[in-house]
Amino acid sequence: MEVTKETIIGDIIDFDEDCSEIFLEAGMHCLDCPVSRSECIEDACDVHGIDADELIAKLNAYFASKK
């Protein structure tokens, strides 16, 4: 999986639940919230004051390491 700013958080979590730790470490503790599951990375990062590019880089590195 390759994550972009437009990728929906629920799709990422559904693809690999273990990556939820990356979201938690970034400060997104509301992964069970129905709204967060339908938000794209960019919108969720804006709401939480998180650098979207940094989170995306961590997620993509995680997925690349699993290949």
Image (spheres, rainbow, N blue to C red):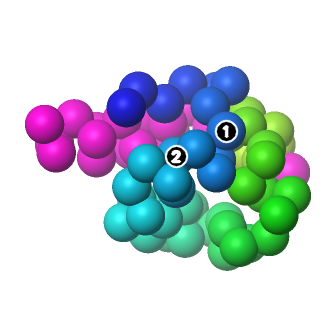
Residue type, numbered disc 2: Ile
Residue 10 image position (x, y, % from top left): 64, 51
The image shows residue 30, relative to residue 67, as above or below, that is below
Residue type, numbered disc 1: Ile
User: Does residue 65 belong to the magenta stretch?
Assistant: yes
* Residues shaded magenta: 47-67
**Which residue corresponds to the image point at 43% horizontal and 64% vertical from the top-left?**
17
Structural crowding at the residue carrying mark 2, measured as other residues with C-alpha within 10 Å and reported as few (<14), some (14–19) or many (≥20): many
User: Does residue 41 belong to the magenta stretch?
Assistant: no
**Which residue corresponds to the image point at 22% horizontal and 35% vertical from the top-left?**
64
Return the residue at label 1: 8
27 vs 21, left or right, is right
Secondary element under disc 2, as helix, strand or loop, is helix
State the predominant SS element of the stretch in magenta.
helix
Quarter the N terminus occupies: top left
Residue 20 image position (x, y, % from top left): 48, 65
Res. 50 mark: none
Residue 53 image position (x, y, % from top left): 55, 31
**Which residue corresponds to the image point at 73% horizontal and 37% vertical from the top-left?**
40
The image shows residue 42, relative to residue 4, as above or below, that is below
Can residue 49 be seen at all in this image of the molecule?
Answer: no
Q: Estimate the spatial distance between the alpha carbons at disc 2 and disc 1, rounded to whole Å.
A: 7 Å
The image shows a total of numbered marks equal to 2
| Occupied quadrant, residue 30 | bottom right
Return the residue at label 2: 12
Residue 42 image position (x, y, % from top left): 73, 34
**Which residue corresponds to the image point at 16% horizontal and 42% vertical from the top-left?**
65
> 5 or 49: nearer the eye?
5
C-beta proximity under 8 Å, tags 2 and 1: yes
